[in-house]
Image (cartoon, rainbow, N blue to C red):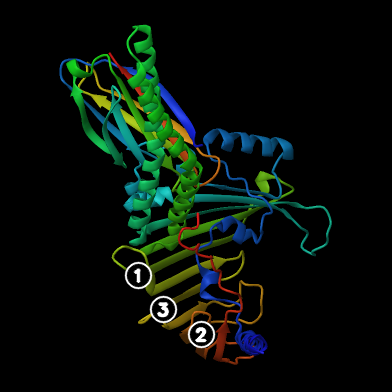
Amino acid sequence: MADKVKTDDTYQVGAADVFLSLTIGDGQFGTSDVFVGGTQIVRASGPIGNLRLGSGATIKGKKLLVRSVVSDVSTMTNKMSVSYRLNGGTAPKAIVAKGSVAISGKTLVFETRFALS
Amino acid sequence: MRTAAAILLVAVGSMGIAHAQTPVEIDDLRAPTSPAFVLLDVTPASVERPENPKAFTVNLINTISRAKGLPQNYALEVAPYWLTYHPNLTFEQYQTPGARSLVQTLAISVATTPMTPADGSAADPIGTRIGLGFRTNITNGRFDATMNRLVGELATLQGRLLDVGKAEDAVEAAEDALAAAKQAGQPTDALQNALKARQAELASLKAQEGEVETDLMTKALEIQALDAQRVGLIVTLAAGKTWDFPADDFEMAQAGRWGVWVTPTYRFRACTPNGSECTAVVDAIAVVRALRDPGKDTSWDVGGRMMWQPTRELKLSSEILRRWAGASTTGTAVVAGDSNRTTAMIEYQIRRDLSLYASFGRDFKKDTGQKPLVSLMGLNVGLGKRPTVAVPAAGTP
């Protein structure tokens, strides 16, 4: 079973629509699922730009889960990272989850949860 | 009988090759991976390759403190760009780096070796020789159509792993719903059935998880392997220099040999639209190498090789190599003074494991002034058995 990198964070929403952007970094390739309150919003390979998660009122109190499967396709590094940018809430937020594989070609699963408050 | 005939043909071919062999080939003049090692003429048994700034610093401090001064027989290769994370570097940007290629492919090599007395005696070292070099790709080409197919297959496999996580979430949600219903004293039959269905689905996906992960790794390594088969224009620059430190005294440092390599290559591969099969159609390489030893003239080597494959079976190539300056830097006495080598080769693949080739041209001038003729004809015979995989009969599990 692939190793997991788990991250928990919070994001304060307002009344406006909330958007998520995601980048699979370090030249690696990944595919991501995005769920809000257990409902899948999207599955996409590579970066995701400004994905609308819903209005602040509708998503407040729910969990945002982003699960990315990232494979080591780079000959230059075994490092992997996924960066998340949320905006539309009370303030923009950006975080980066990092990991690395010990064996070239292996896969890591990044699971990041935001409590939308 | 057939095998014996093949061995005989190979033996005849090998004799021809041995006769025409020269000490310098185009491939010998390509920009080296580790210029510092080449200039010091060392092949380190182990090379330190730190992957982050902390490992790099610890490695350096440990080495210097262990050696109580300049370390000897030490080799280090480091790619500075990859010491740290790059969260904003996407896969697409990595594949087509443009000007970023200079920093992304930059590799620095450092090596040390003991200085031996000039008479070559095996006495204690009289100091330390240090080599420092770098290599980078000014342009780094691109991937062929095979990449799109592999990436698509990788994405599908990653999706199957995501399905496992999704099924785990579904089981968790069904368990929560059942627990809540029990707590509220509501009927639970439907929820229990739903949970069982989710669990069965998860078990089915879990059973395939190991296989999916193995396939994922295979696919990821196939993509990595494409790095070595980039197409388009790739220009590699490498340079290095050595210094001697007699008695390990920095004040007595003497500059040693230096070298610069520039290797532009161009490869075009024609692929089927889905990238399932690619064939090299044009493969060109140019080499420029300058080497200078203390007290000697700079030795220049300039050359190129062009390969054209008009059909799958036929391969035509020509090669020219020009050398200026007196002494050979290869340690052999075959090449003397300004000289050049020009050859043309034709190869025809009769079968998958059998090809006919012919080579003709002029070799480097020898010390005697003779300009040997390169004339060679032969057969390349593959003697190994082709691997076969048994296909299970229909209905066989």
Q: To which residue does mark 2 refer?
A: B355
Mark with earlier residue (2, 3) = 3
**Label 3 Cα neighbours within 10 Å, binned few <14 / some 14-19 / many ≥20:** many
Residue B60, labelled with which disc? none
Relative to A37, B249 lies left or right: right
Real-space Cα separation, disc 3 to disc 1, in angstroms: 11 Å
Residue pictured at 35% horizontal, 40% vertical: A31
Chain letter, disc 2 residue:
B
- Front residue of B148/B140: it is B148
**Label 2 Cα neighbours within 10 Å, binned few <14 / some 14-19 / many ≥20:** some
Quarter that holds the C terminus of chain A: top left
- Front residue of B386/A32: it is B386
Mark with earlier residue (3, 1) = 1
Tell which tag, 2 or 3, sits nearer the viewer: 2
Task: State the image coordinates of residue A56 (x, y, percent, origin top left).
Answer: 19, 18
Question: Which element type, helix, strand or loop, lies under badge 2?
Answer: strand
Tell me whether circle 3 and circle 1 mark residues in contact (CB < 8 Å). no
Residue pictured at 43% horizontal, 57% vertical: B227
Chain letter, disc 3 residue:
B
Q: Which kind of residue does numbered mark 1 sit on?
A: Phe
Question: Which element type, helix, strand or loop, lies under badge 3?
Answer: strand
Relative to B332, B166 lies left or right: left
Real-space Cα separation, disc 2 to disc 3, in angstroms: 16 Å
**Rendered image quadrant of residue B54:** top right
Q: How many marks?
A: 3
Q: To which residue does mark 3 refer?
A: B307
Q: Report the residue that reaches farthest toward the top.
A: B184
Residue A103 position (above or below residue A35) = below
Residue B209 position (above or below residue B332) = above
Residue B268, labelled with which disc? 1
